Image: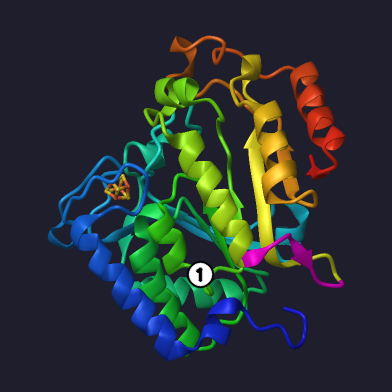
Amino acid sequence: MAEGFVPAYRKLGLEALRRRAGEAYRQLKRCELCGRRCAVNRLLDETGVCRAGRRVLISGYGPHFGEEAPLVGEHGSGTIFLTYCNLKCVFCQNYDISWEGGGDVVTGRELADIMLALQKRGCHNINFVSPTHYVPQILAALYLAARRGLGVPLVYNTGGYDSQETLKLLDGIVDIYMPDVKYMDPEVARRLSGVEDYPAVVRAALREMQRQVGDLVTDRRGIATRGLLVRHLVLPGGLAGTAALVDFLAAEISPNCFLNIMGQYYPAYRARRFPPLDRRSTKEELRAAIQLARDRGLRVYT
Ligand code: SF4
């Protein structure tokens, strides 16, 4: 990282980080880490909708060059792909990991080793993909890694269905929030992910994330050091609710909000049973979504 950079979790201090990890672990006793609020005791390895228990599973890790340029820089984003997901999207492009549980168990020490190895390889950040259901375990591993010299920013790369309690646990720890906002209509969210309250939960999450970290900030090399980076996949037939999202971001989050409008949708998993998800998004749909965001003055990344 740029000289003098100190990530949020190091400013917080090791003792506070240790306490926060302990506080987070206690929440596993009655898991309400996400909007599903299953209330299962994951310390006893009971599982809820996401199917994650006490132990962490990851499906892979490494420097990743397919993320947004401010995360990738020269040496890549240090991405760690976590197994299972609290959202159950019918069009999931990683369903073997998120639904079927592909991956290997790692201990907290091993997770800390991975973070440090990614830093050693020059990655500009540690990027946890689908982290919500493992926040307590991530914080415990982060404490171990910070003790051993971890010093790059933490990216929280989430589907956005995080409870407020979970986000409070991350306050002063996460440097970069990267929620992927999927829908803005409750009926669409119910049909495609089984979570009717997704729009309400993600709106509240975006407000809290912006309160914690503010607009996206980059260093003189253009590498992100802090802030909110919103992702939004354009679904066919306007299902993603782009107009409502950009209105919300401009009016209630920030006119300078950094928004990546993504056009790579293709029908995966069970999508063919849910028209119009049985086709790709068209170039016109993508263009229209980008235009909507530009019209609101957002910092649009494509
Ligand atoms: S993280 Fe998993 S177990 Fe916990 S509330 Fe969400 S879906 Fe349920």
Q: Residue at x 40, y 60 (%)?
A: 166
Find disc 1 in the rendering and name its residue: 171
Q: Residues within 10 Å of mark 1 (few under 14, many from 20)?
A: some
> Where is 87 relative to 34, above or below?
above
Residue 32 is inside the magenta segment? no
Quadrant housing the C terminus? top right
**Left or right of 41 on screen, residue 172:** right
Q: Amino acid at mark 1?
A: Asp
> Where is 148 relative to 178, above or below?
below
Element type where label 1 sits in the image: loop
Residue 142, horizontal then vertical, whole percent: 44, 76
Magenta part of the chain = 213-220
Predominant SS along the magenta part: loop
**Residue with the most extreme left position:** 44
Q: Residue at x 39, y 62 (%)?
A: 135
Name the foreground residue: 199 vs 142.
199
**Residue with the most extreme front position:** 251
Name the foreground residue: 283 vs 253.
253
Residue 225, horizontal then vertical, whole percent: 71, 70
Quadrant housing the N terminus? bottom right
Asked if one can make out residue 109 in the rendered structure from this viewpoint, the answer is: no
Q: Residue at x 44, y 50 (%)?
A: 162
Q: Residue at x 81, y 43 (%)?
A: 300
Number of numbered discs on residues = 1
Asked if one can make out residue 220 in the rendered structure from this viewpoint, the answer is: yes
Residue 267, horizontal then vertical, whole percent: 55, 20
> Where is 222 relative to 17, above or below?
above
